[in-house]
């Protein structure tokens, strides 16, 4: 879809410094009801991300009197369990996105990396926002009427310069169904591809009646 990260990201961003203490982090998580914060260096660049999961490592270890959890924790998690500041606890290999990146790109990164949030940085690497899983899902908040209006008026009429009366477009719960007879198969396929990128579209049911493909015999087309 065409939505950009800048359309859904949260600003301004609550960020912390490497020296922010464990207790301060816990208090900030409760106050802002978020699951993590970017960590900024002196130049305002993102140098890490600290999450509630990072803080939980300490809680788990302190309560693990029998050593059962400690035995299965990874080495880096054990180090975090001993941490007392954001700099100790944070994840340093931070993946970021730009405001002009697509929501689809951000969603793919989150899914692949199994992270809940991505810092958004400008061309200089400075923090300008943050995008969460919940933010990405806001692209589906549009009503069926809004989606249909964009498809009919913006896509079919103004982008493809086609009379919308040639197609029947219905939208139910974000699922678009298109019925009609495009002039060429290529036109029909291009139209369906474009409709799938409309913000808020969950799926597209292609019920177009495509013209038969051209056949050739000895260089003659019919």
Image (cartoon, rainbow, N blue to C red):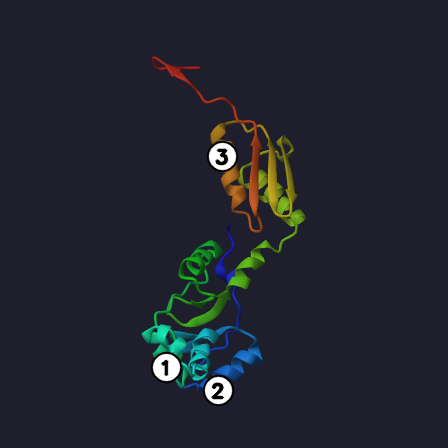
Lower sequence index among marks 1 and 2:
2
Lower sequence index among marks 1 and 3:
1
The answer to whether one can see residue 143 in this image is yes
Question: Which image quarter holds the C terminus?
Answer: top left
* Mark nearer the viewer, 2 or 3: 2
**Residue 147 screen position, x and y as percent:** 62, 47
Badge 3 element: helix
**Residue 200 screen position, x and y as percent:** 58, 51
Badge 2 element: helix
Q: Are marks 1 and 2 in contact (CB under 8 Å)?
A: no
Q: In this view, does 168 lie above or below 91?
A: above
Q: Which residue lies furthest to the right in this view?
A: 145
Image quadrant assignment for residue 32: bottom right
**Label placed on residue 23:** 2
Left or right position of 194 against 145:
left
The residue at which mark 1 appears reads as: 88
Q: In this view, does 5 lie above or below 22?
A: above
The residue at which mark 3 appears reads as: 189
Lower sequence index among marks 2 and 3:
2
Q: How many labels does the image show?
A: 3
* Mark nearer the viewer, 1 or 3: 1
Q: Which residue is drawn at 40% across and 85% down?
A: 85
**Residue 112 screen position, x and y as percent:** 41, 58
| Structural crowding at the residue carrying mark 2, measured as other residues with C-alpha within 10 Å and reported as few (<14), some (14–19) or many (≥20) | few
Left or right position of 169 against 42:
right
> Rounded to the nearest whole Å, what is the CA distance between mark 2 and mark 3?
56 Å
> Rounded to the nearest whole Å, what is the CA distance between mark 1 and mark 2?
13 Å
Left or right position of 81 against 29:
left
Badge 1 element: helix
> Rounded to the nearest whole Å, what is the CA distance between mark 1 and mark 3?
53 Å
| Structural crowding at the residue carrying mark 1, measured as other residues with C-alpha within 10 Å and reported as few (<14), some (14–19) or many (≥20) | many
């Amino acid at each position: 879809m065409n939505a950009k990260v800048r359309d859904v990201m949260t600003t301004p961003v609550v960020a912390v410094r490497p020296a922010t203490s464990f207790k301060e982090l816990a208090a900030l998580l409760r106050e802002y009801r978020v699951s993590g914060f970017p960590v900024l260096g002196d130049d305002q660049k993102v140098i890490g991300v600290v999450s509630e999961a990072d803080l939980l490592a300490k809680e788990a270890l302190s309560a693990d009197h029998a050593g059962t959890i400690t035995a299965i924790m990874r080495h880096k998690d054990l180090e975090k369990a001993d941490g007392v500041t954001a700099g100790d606890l944070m994840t340093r290999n931070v993946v970021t996105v730009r405001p002009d990146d697509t929501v689809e790109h951000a969603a793919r990164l989150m899914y692949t990396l199994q992270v809940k949030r991505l810092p958004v940085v400008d061309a200089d690497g400075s923090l300008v926002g943050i995008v969460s899983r919940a933010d990405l899902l806001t692209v589906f908040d549009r009503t069926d009427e809004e989606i249909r209006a964009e498809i009919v008026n913006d896509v079919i009429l103004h982008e493809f310069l086609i009379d919308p009366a040639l197609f029947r477009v219905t939208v139910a719960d974000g699922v678009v169904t298109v019925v009609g007879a495009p002039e060429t198969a290529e036109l029909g396929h291009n139209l369906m591809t474009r409709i799938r990128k409309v913000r808020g579209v969950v799926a597209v049911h292609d019920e177009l009646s495509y013209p038969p493909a051209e056949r050739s015999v000895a260089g003659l087309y019919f």
